Image (cartoon, coloured by chain):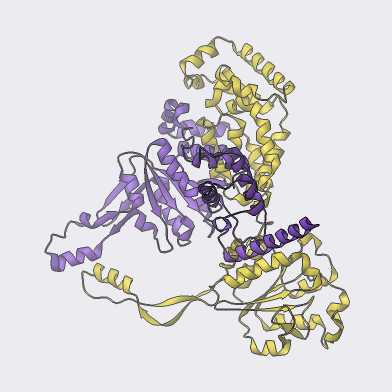
Chain colours: A purple, B yellow
Amino acid sequence: MKGVESTFFSNSKYNRRNILIMNNDDFDRFKGSQDYVASEALRNAVNVSIALAKPLLVRGEPGTGKTLLAHSIAKGLGKKLIIWNIKSTTKAQEGLYVYDTVQRLNDSRFGGKEVSDIRQYIKLGKLGQSFTSKEQLVLLIDEIDKADLEFPNDLLNELDEMSFYIPETNETFKAIHRPIVIITSNAEKELPDAFLRRCVFHYIEFPDPELMEEIVHVHFPNLKDDLLKEALRTFYSLREIDQFRKKPSTSELIDWVQVLVASSTSPEIISKEIPFTSTLIKKEADHSFFSNLYMRRKQASRVSGYD
Amino acid sequence: MFTNFFYTLKDRKVPVSITEWMTLMDALSKGCITTMNEFYCMARAILVKSEAHYDQYDLAFQEYFRGLGSPLPEIYEQLLEWLKDPFNRLLLTPEERALLNSMSLEELMKEFEKRLKEQTEQHDGGSRWIGRGGTSPFGHSGQHPSGIRVGGSGGSRSAIKIAEDRRFRNYRHDLTLDVRQLKVALTQLRQLNRVGPEELDLKNTIDATCKNAGELEFVWGKSRKNAVKLLLLMDVGGSMEPFAQLCSLLFSAAHSSSHFKDFKYYYFHNCVYDVLDKDTDRRDRVSVDQFIRTMEPDHKVILVGDACMATSELIDSLGSIYYYERNHKPGLYRLKQIAEHFSHCVWLNPEAESYWNHPTIAAIRRIFPMYELTLDGLSQAIKKLTVKR
């Protein structure tokens, strides 16, 4: 620790100034927003990533609110949000800037415009925009694993230094304010180690019943307790069926509760009949599996009922 | 600070690097972490980069922080050292400094010790130390790393408790599997070849032309296709019953992966004998000789089975447990035939490696490289399948 401390104090003035001006309010800021309930671990991860100015990598089951997190952070901290959606064809370069050579060629041949100023053909990408903005932004890089394997590596330097160089115009852009970077991933591809080392990582677990109650309450503040309890109980017992290809997730539960409320279903019926399963179970195979299993049990109970 | 925790993590096979450790130290010195719970969460966020390692992290956390009895000599010393360094006092707010000045160092240490002792006695109450943070000089030392431990020792029990729950056991790569994870693993099984006629690469042509100041410049290329052909041979014999669910996951993953050039599957019972089945009812069958004649040797073969049977079933002719099968060549011979014909074969065993001391498993391992049917095992197997011979 002594070594750590001495390098820490000697190596940069910046750091020292930072701790001197930093009081507890400078980090520990994200507390979840009104319509987003974050677990303690998640809040901690967000705050440590903000304090250390490192990108936060979020992973988790589909429907656990990875993308919503960025929206919530932006809302909670009152900052603008820039979303960079990654597709399989996205290149790292596009996030920084695009040099529109086709437009320039067109202008030079047919437009009669002055084309010697290349700057007018440089269009900043999402990452570039977040660097050049006058205020601090939240940047969401959504589904980074969709892109090519090399994609994260191509961003390493830019995310580290928060600056990039445009050779065409011989300009260097440096971030005025380091954006708060949130990256989501579905673990479709392994991310390179060098990239991971620079991130703060959080895995969003599937919420436990208590947290889930809170989440549902945020969406339906006037929900009756018995209805909520029954719905959650049924929902979690459905999630325990391992044979499902896709287990119902939070967003499906929210939909389901909405239908239950709209149809004013009584709580007793919920666990007995499990109405509106089509909002919970989305795969055909799961649906047929479930209806088979459930019908059989229903019949069995009817037979025993006659006894 | 906590340096041994780093090595505990390493021992538990959590891949942590110095870079990440230094990041954690940075976080500590910036005072982001004030309670043990926060330390648990934040250290995990910084050090661990996959939910697959959360469980190992939990174990290491338990091991390290349980081992620390409560007067903590390491931290005690660090606290002393910190207090002695006048520079550190500059970091405190005026109120804190006033508080600190009102006590002499000895008094302070005495008070500290007293509270530490109280803490051991109040093991179950726990909350006091966090709650008092506002007024106690120890709670306030959050700016210094040791402050965490001091202010947060009440909370430490619950952090360890979280670690003890081991909620992430199911996320370990060597345990869980679902279709999607398997599919992701199977996507590694590819060899991209440039095939087909040369086609005009429109996008690159435009780019090149523009860079060339408008003079046309054509770019040609071939599209890339995955050349891997997969052949899956699965044991559906009685002893495989417990693993049926697992095997069907693997099957549906392979079946729904669209990136293979060719995918074929056959079934066998216990061991491969004279025939292979095209379906599980054993109606549509093909003789192994015929099968070997017609299959090209560049198929990648994955055999799935527990490889566990009576020795006679493997090495005797007429050894099949199905009496009417009357296999004239022993199973071992057939397996060798497959191994010789196809250039890349692996055997996936759903049974855990610790159970692999059965003689027939040993015999089969001499023919095929064998891996566990887990995510780790599968990715190792796929590496084996994609090496060039």
Please tell me which residue is depicted at 63% across the width and 11% down the height of the picture: B107
Describe residue A115's horizontal placement relative to residue B153 as left or right.
Answer: left
Residue B213, by quadrant, is bottom left
Residue B341, by quadrant, is bottom right
| Image: A200 above or below B69 | below
Please tell me which residue is depicted at 59% across the width and 59% down the height of the picture: A246
**Residue in the foreground of this view, choosing between B264 and B56:** B264
Residue pushed farthest top? B102
Q: Could you tell me which quadrant the C terminus of chain A lies in?
A: bottom right
**Residue in the foreground of this view, choosing between B255 and B206:** B255
Describe residue A109's horizontal placement relative to residue A303 as left or right.
Answer: left
| Image: B336 above or below A294 | below
**Residue in the foreground of this view, choosing between A255 and B120:** A255
Q: Could you tell me which quadrant the N terminus of chain A lies in?
A: top right
Describe residue B341's horizontal placement relative to residue B216 as left or right.
Answer: right
Residue pushed farthest front? A306
Image x and y of residue B371, in percent:
71, 66
**Residue in the foreground of this view, choosing between B101 and A29:** A29
Image x and y of residue B291, in percent:
68, 87
Please tell me which residue is depicted at 71% across the width and 85% down the height of the picture: B284
Please tell me which residue is depicted at 69% across the width and 34% down the height of the picture: B65
